C-alpha cells in the first residue's frame, strides 16, 4: 500500500487555485486540506496520484432539451417551445419553424458536446431513438425510463439512461427497482435523477428528491450518506434544483452544491445558473465532481449564454463511464 502523502507546504503557494477550490469544500466538511490529500492518496497507484496532482477534471457542459409528443416537440425546462434564434449556429436553415431532437443532436456533435434528451411522455421515444443515430455514445436519455425500455435506448446508442419517478412510489424510494435497472443496463450506463426542492422538515431546511414535478415531493433526503448510497448503483446523477412551486430558482444554492460534491460519481447540475460567475462558483465548489446543464438560457434559443463559448471552454464528449474503482460495500445489495 502506498504511504500517506501530504503536500510540501514550502513548495505549495497559498494562492494555488486547486487548493483554494478544494479547501472551500473540504473545510466545510471539517477535514483539513493536508489530511484530505493523505486520505485520497491512501492506496493510490502512481498514475492515480499524478491525476490528483493535475487537479480535478474540467467541468463539463452538457446541454439538455425536453421532448413532448406534439408538433412543437423540443421545449425548455418549463415546457415552452424552443426555436433556434435566426442566424445562430452560423446556418441559414435556422429559420426553420420546427426544431427537432435530431437537429439538436447534430449541433451537439459538431460542437464537441454530449447532451441530454429528456422525454416528457412515453410517446416521444421514437423521436429520441431517431436523434441517437446522429450522435451515438454521447447522448443521455431521461424520462419514462423503466426496465422494459432502458435496454432499447442503450442498444440504440445512448451512453446512459436516467431513471426518475420509476424508482419512487407514494413518495418512497423503491430500491428493488433501482437494483433491477442496474442489472438490465449495467451501472456504467445508469444515471439517477435526484432533482430536488428545499423545504422545512422538523424545523430545519433540507433537500428532498423531486424527480418529477407532476408528482408529489418524495421523502428521500439528499444527504451525503443518501447520495453515496444511490451512487453505488449508477455512474451519474442528474440534479435540477427547483423552488417549491416547480420553477427554476433565481440563483444557485451553494449548500446544495456542497452536498452534491460528496458524490463519488459525476453530477450533472442545473437550476439557478444565470451568469458566468455562477459557473465559476460551481467549478470551485464542485471538487471535480460537478458538471452543469442549461437549456432555455442558451443564446441559440434567445438566452444570455453564448453556446459556442461554453462548448469551447467546457465541451467534452460524455464518457461511457467515469466512476470510482474503489471497493465499496453497499447495504442495499444484502437486502435483495
Image (cartoon, rainbow, N blue to C red):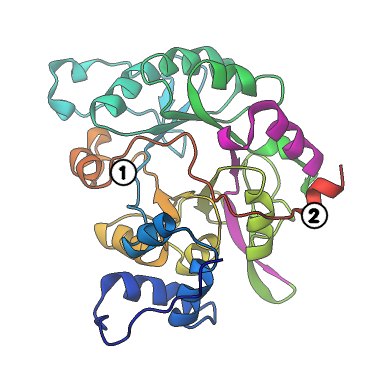
Residue 29 pos. (x, y %): 54, 77
Q: Is residue 108 magenta?
A: no
Q: Which mark is residue 331?
A: 2
Location of the C terminus (image quadrant): top right
Mark 2: few, some, or many residues within 10 Å (few <14, many ≥20)? few
Q: How many marks?
A: 2
Instruction: Indicate the secondary structure of the residue bearing disc 2.
Output: helix
Image spot of residue 84 (x, y percent): 25, 26
- Which marked residue is nearer to the observer: mark 2 or mark 1? 2
Quadrant of the image containing the N terminus: bottom right
Gap in Å between the C-alphas at discs 2 and 1? 41 Å
Q: Report the front residue among 183 and 220.
A: 183
Determine whether the residue tagged by mark 1 lies in a helix, strand or loop. Answer: loop
The answer to whether residue 174 shows anywhere in this view is no
Q: Visible in this render: residue 172? A: yes
- Horizontal and vertical percent for residue 97? 28, 16
Q: What residue lies at 40% left-to-right and 50% top-to-bottom?
A: 291
Residue found at the very far front of the displayed protein = 1
- Mark 1 surroundings: few (<14), some (14-19) or many (≥20) residues within 10 A: some
Residue furthest to the right: 335
Tell me which corner region of the image, top left, top right, bottom left or bottom right, holds residue 285: bottom left
Kindly identify the residue that appears in the image at 49 percent across and 15 percent down.
Answer: 129
Mark number displayed over residue 297: 1
Q: Are marks 2 and 1 in contact (CB under 8 Å)?
A: no
Position of residue 216 measured from the top left corner of the image (x, y, whole percent): 71, 46
* Label 2 or label 1, whichever comes before in sequence order: 1
Nearer to me, 103 or 53: 53
Q: Is residue 182 magenta?
A: yes
Residue plotted at (62% across, 37% down) = 187
Q: Which residues are magenta?
A: 175-201
- Compared across the picture, whether 132 is left or right of 147 comes to left
Amino acid at each position: 500500500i502506498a504511504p500517506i502523502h501530504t503536500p510540501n507546504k514550502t513548495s505549495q503557494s497559498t494562492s494555488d487555485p486547486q487548493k483554494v477550490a478544494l479547501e472551500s469544500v473540504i473545510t466545510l466538511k471539517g477535514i483539513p486540506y493536508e489530511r484530505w490529500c493523505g486520505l485520497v492518496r491512501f492506496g493510490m497507484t502512481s498514475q492515480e496520484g499524478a491525476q490528483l496532482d493535475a487537479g480535478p477534471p474540467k467541468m463539463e457542459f452538457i446541454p439538455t432539451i425536453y421532448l413532448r409528443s406534439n408538433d412543437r416537440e423540443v421545449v425548455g425546462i418549463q415546457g415552452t417551445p424552443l426555436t433556434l434564434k435566426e442566424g445562430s449556429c452560423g446556418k441559414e436553415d435556422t429559420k426553420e419553424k420546427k426544431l427537432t431532437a435530431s437537429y439538436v443532436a447534430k449541433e451537439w456533435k459538431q460542437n464537441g458536446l454530449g447532451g441530454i434528451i429528456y422525454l416528457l411522455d412515453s410517446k416521444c421515444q421514437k423521436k429520441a431513438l431517431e436523434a441517437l443515430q446522429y450522435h451515438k455514445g454521447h447522448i443521455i436519455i431521461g424520462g419514462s425510463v423503466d426496465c422494459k425500455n432502458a435496454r432499447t435506448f442503450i442498444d440504440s446508442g445512448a451512453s446512459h439512461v436516467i431513471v426518475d419517478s420509476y424508482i419512487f412510489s407514494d413518495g418512497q424510494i423503491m430500491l428493488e427497482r433501482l437494483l433491477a435497472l442496474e442489472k438490465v443496463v449495467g451501472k456504467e450506463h445508469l444515471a439517477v435523477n435526484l432533482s430536488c426542492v428545499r423545504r422545512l422538515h422538523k424545523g430545519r431546511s433540507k433537500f428532498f428528491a423531486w424527480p418529477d414535478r407532476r408528482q408529489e415531493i418524495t421523502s428521500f433526503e439528499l444527504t451525503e450518506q443518501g447520495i453515496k448510497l444511490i451512487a453505488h448503483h449508477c455512474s451519474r446523477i442528474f440534479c435540477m434544483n427547483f423552488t417549491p412551486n416547480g420553477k427554476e430558482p433565481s440563483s444557485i444554492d451553494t449548500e446544495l452544491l456542497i452536498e452534491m460534491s460528496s458524490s463519488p460519481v459525476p453530477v450533472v447540475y442545473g437550476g439557478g445558473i444565470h451568469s458566468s460567475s455562477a459557473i465559476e462558483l460551481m467549478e470551485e465548489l464542485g471538487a471535480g465532481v460537478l458538471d452543469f446543464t442549461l437549456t432555455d438560457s442558451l443564446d441559440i434559443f434567445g438566452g444570455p449564454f453564448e453556446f459556442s463559448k461554453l462548448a469551447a471552454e467546457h465541451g467534452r464528449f460524455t464518457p461511457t463511464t467515469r466512476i470510482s474503482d474503489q471497493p465499496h460495500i453497499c447495504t442495499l445489495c444484502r437486502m435483495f
